[in-house]
Amino acid sequence: MNTTSCEVKPSATERCGCYTISDLAKEFEVTPRALRLYEESGLLEPQRDGQKRIYSERDRVRLRLIIRGKRIGCSLAEVKELFDMYDSSPGESGQIKRLLEKLDERRQALELQRSELALSLADIEQIEQRALETLRELENKGH
């Protein structure tokens, strides 16, 4: 019986726990330029083989965290601060407290944005209702 598998076989670099810039760009749907920016920002630290960048499993995990941080609105500087905190040793308790502070700051900023958006949407709805009423009045006068 001939069966086909949809499973993608890992590349040689993936099997050894190392990844090329193309591997990570494809996996995380980012551009190689973004990966180079993260490297320049000190967020990723690939090894070099001549001009070729070789990313470790650590870099792969960090990239996942960078993307997650960006998704919740953290700047690259804030992501770097969190990475630096984990790379140093203020103690796990201190690290978790700082992370919680950062999350609370971000939550507050998002809540403010949400309330501002709600006000903007209410303004739009009010203007829309006035415009519809005016249009109806004009159309009724015309007939």
Image (cartoon, rainbow, N blue to C red):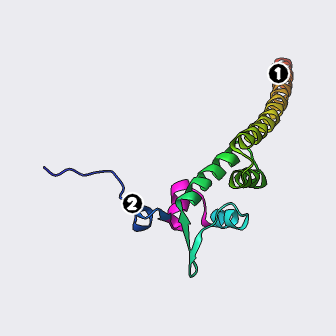
Instruction: Report helix, strand or loop for mark 1.
Output: helix
Closer to the chain start, of discs 1 and 2, is 2
Report the residue marked by disc 2.
Answer: 10
Q: Which mark is residue 64?
A: none
Label 2 SS: loop
Q: Nearest the camera: 51 or 61?
A: 61
Q: Nearer the viewer, mark 1 or mark 2?
A: 2
Taking the magenta stretch, the answer to whether it contains residue 21 is: yes
Side of 48 relative to 140 (left or right)? left
Q: Is 58 a magenta residue? A: no
Give whichever of 120, 87 is nearer the camera: 87
Q: CA distance from mark 1 to mark 2?
A: 57 Å
Percent x, y for residue 58? 57, 58
Q: Measuring 80% from the left and 31% from the top, which residue is drawn there?
A: 111
Q: What's the magenta region?
A: 19-32
Q: Position of residue 12 (x, y in %)?
A: 40, 67
Q: Position of residue 93 (x, y in %)?
A: 71, 39
Mark 1 surroundings within 10 Å by alpha-carbon count, few (fewer than 14), some (14 through 19), many (20 or more): few
Q: Residue at x 81, y 34 (%)?
A: 113
Q: Which residue is disc 1 drawn over?
A: 129
